[in-house]
Image (cartoon, coloured by chain):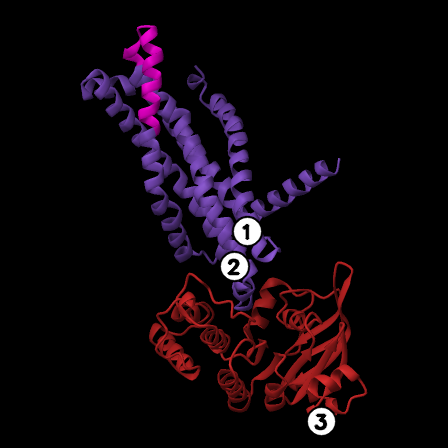
Chain colours: A purple, B red
Amino acid sequence: MRWLSRLFEFVGKVGLFSLRVLIDWLKPPFEFAQLSRQLAEVGNRSLALVVVSGFALGAVMTLHTRSTLVTFGATAMIPAVQAVSFFVEIGPLVAGLLLAGRVGSGIGAVLANMRASEQIDAIESLSIDSFKFLVVPRVLACVIALPFLTLFMDFAGLLGGFLSEVLSSHIAPALYLNRAFDYLQWSNFIAPTLKTAVFGFIIGSVSSYFGYTTDKGAQGVGEAATNSVVVSSLLIILADVLLIKCIFFLFPDTAI
Amino acid sequence: MIANQSIAVEFKSVMKSFGTKRVLNDVSFQIGQGQALCLLGRSGTGKSVTLKLIMALMRPDSGEVWVDQSNVVGMGEHQLSLVRKKLGYLFQDAALFDSLTLYENLALPLGRLTKKSKDEIDDVIRRVLTDVGLGADGAKYPSALSGGMKKRAGLARALVLEPKILLADEPSSGLDRITAAEIDELLMRCKTERGTALIIVTHDVHGARKVADQVGVLDKGNLVAFGSVEEVSQSDNDVARRLITE
């Protein structure tokens, strides 16, 4: 039962850490310079990964869907299946998991390295609140960047699927787009995209927790990076289940 | 005994443990404004912990730590930040911020903690960097600096706010004799020209003999000797005598 008590202890510590992030968000001074630096780090530098992955995933998904739907003579549904599945679930979830890998490991490793090399102590010694200076801008950058990166992933996936389908069936672009957006409502689009802000909060706060609180020196850097990715990814998948239930509750029409 | 208003740092019966290991055991001492204290001792005897307790980066298990007439133990973050403005800290490995240039490392505290204009900040940084011999290196990132340059850059950052008290953790470790002597010279100038109180953790006895008004020797968490270099060299404690006369 020791593992269970350790699990509860961990959940409590991460919960309190995340609560402190929320409280410190609202308290001045606001670290706008740090926020813009982190937005560039989280957003700009992840864009290529997200777009290329989305494009490839969209193309591959269309190829698989086509081979199945051909059996039922429902190839006309391919654009709709592609668009709905990407915008509602695949885009947000895959973007969250990709970013947990790229951004989560980065935040965990950077903060753990700063802790090991006494840079965090140095910030405190300069009368600067290291939590507000280092942690809050990183979490906020993840919360802001994730929905935008998800949109890029969604549209890259749609483009990948479109090109794949055009090459397979020579469908007219206008027809493809008409069929793709026929079944897509605003509620299919807005709520799933916004839920990635929660994924961003999970990635930012969990990774910052592992990096900021490590006390194992250089060894802690690797551990923080690994733990950040594993725990963020798990929590994103769990949160996704809960958020889908919430979306179905708030927008019953989307629960087909 | 030093008059109350001129005490820079005072420890009163300070205890600190990590797990079952007692790092500081009932340590008491005081140093005055404008004085230099060198803390000597073997590795792992609590010297760096002493500096971190003064900066309130750690809390003692019991006892009081007075910095410029304020007890920092149990102090809130806001009050603590006011006390820390009076302190400069040279970390053992300099602890420069990797993602910022040398200039930005120095500009960060100046921009946030003073009301200086951009031009005034530029002037201060240029002067301090020239003082430590890095006048032409402001645009470099820490990764492009040698060990000795990092130490001097760390010292520049610690001095940029003109602190009343400077804490230095092994300022000359890993440096050649000439660079170490230059660092000692800089520390001496802080003391004599600005009246800065210095608390220096070091293994360099030659440097300590040059800079220190007081020497403290820590052994197994106990302050086994404290006084002038002459007093400590005649101490009853074998470790203290051997350390100072080596």
According to the picture, the residue beneath numbered tag 2 turns out to be A114
The spot of residue A154 in percent (x, y) is 34, 30
Chain letter of mark 2 equals: A
**Residue at left 54%, top 50%?**
A222
Gap in Å between the C-alphas at discs 1 and 2? 8 Å
**Residue at left 39%, top 42%?**
A145
User: Do discs 1 and 2 share a chain?
Assistant: yes
Residue A27 in sight here? no
Closer mark to the observer between disc 1 and disc 3: 3
Which quarter shows the N terminus of chain B? bottom right
Marks 1 and 3 close (CB-CB < 8 Å): no
Which quarter shows the C terminus of chain B? bottom right
Q: Which residues are magenta?
A: A57-77
Secondary element under disc 2, as helix, strand or loop, is helix
The dot on residue B230 is: 3
The dot on residue B225 is: none
Marks 2 and 3 close (CB-CB < 8 Å): no
Q: Outermost residue, right direction?
A: B236
Chain letter of mark 3 equals: B
Which sits earlier in the primary sequence, circle 1 or circle 2? 2
Label 3 CA crowd tier, 10 Å (few <14, some 14–19, many 20+): some
Label 2 CA crowd tier, 10 Å (few <14, some 14–19, many 20+): many
Residue B186 in sight here? yes
**Residue at left 32%, top 36%?**
A51
Eyeballing the image, is B184 above or below A217? below
**Residue closer to the observer: A169 or A153:** A169
Secondary element under disc 1, as helix, strand or loop, is helix
Gap in Å between the C-alphas at discs 2 and 3? 41 Å
According to the picture, the residue beneath numbered tag 1 turns out to be A211
User: Do discs 1 and 3 share a chain?
Assistant: no
User: Do discs 2 and 3 share a chain?
Assistant: no
